[in-house]
Amino acid sequence: MRLSALYIEKIQEAQQVGEARCRQEGRTEGERELVMLLLTEKLGDVSTELCQEIAGLSALLRFGAMADLTGWLANHR
């Protein structure tokens, strides 16, 4: 059985989407690990509850523009 060119193209597109999603998940996990490392170095042991709360954040200090950062800082002082 020979696969059509369109079918092969769709399989390749799905693979690319899956790979991109995995890379993003890996970056996000790495960011969370770095934040936890920095917090632990600065503050000592971090409670399990706080670790879980941090892990549940959808976007960890991810700002698209300087205005986003300054707005976040203004709301969290």
Image (tube, rainbow, N blue to C red):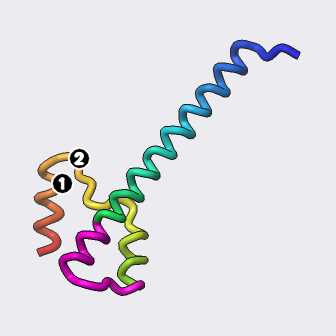
On screen, residue 36 versus residue 10, left or right, reads: left
Quadrant of the snapshot with the C terminus: bottom left
In the rendering, at what x and y percent does residue 69 appear?
15, 57
Q: Position of residue 50 (x, y in %)?
A: 36, 81
Give neighbour class at mark 2: few <14, some 14-19, many 20+ (Cα, 10 Å).
few
> Residue 66 or 2: which is nearer the viewer?
2
Q: Is residue 36 magenta?
A: yes
- Residue 12 sits above or below residue 51 on the image: above
Check disc 1 and report the residue beneath it. 68
Q: Which residue lies at the image location 32% right of the left edge and 83% below the top edge?
A: 46
Q: Main secondary structure of the magenta part?
A: helix
Q: Amino acid at mark 2?
A: Gly
Q: Quadrant of residue 15?
A: top right
Q: Secondary structure at mark 1?
A: helix
Residue drawn 44% across the image and 51% down it: 26
Badge 2 vs badge 1, beta-carbon distance below 8 Å: yes
The spot of residue 37 in percent (x, y) is: 29, 70
- Tell me what residue is drawn at x 18 percent, y 54 percent: 68
Question: Residue flagged by tag 1: what amino acid is it?
Answer: Asp
- For the record, the magenta segment spans 35-48
Distance in Å between CA atoms under marks 2 and 1 = 7 Å
Image coords of residue 70 (percent x, y): 11, 58
Quadrant into which the N terminus falls: top right
At mark 2, the secondary structure is: loop
Number of numbered discs on residues: 2
Residue 69 in magenta stretch: no
> Can you identify the residue that label 2 sits on?
64
Looking at the image, residue 44 lies above or below residue 75: below
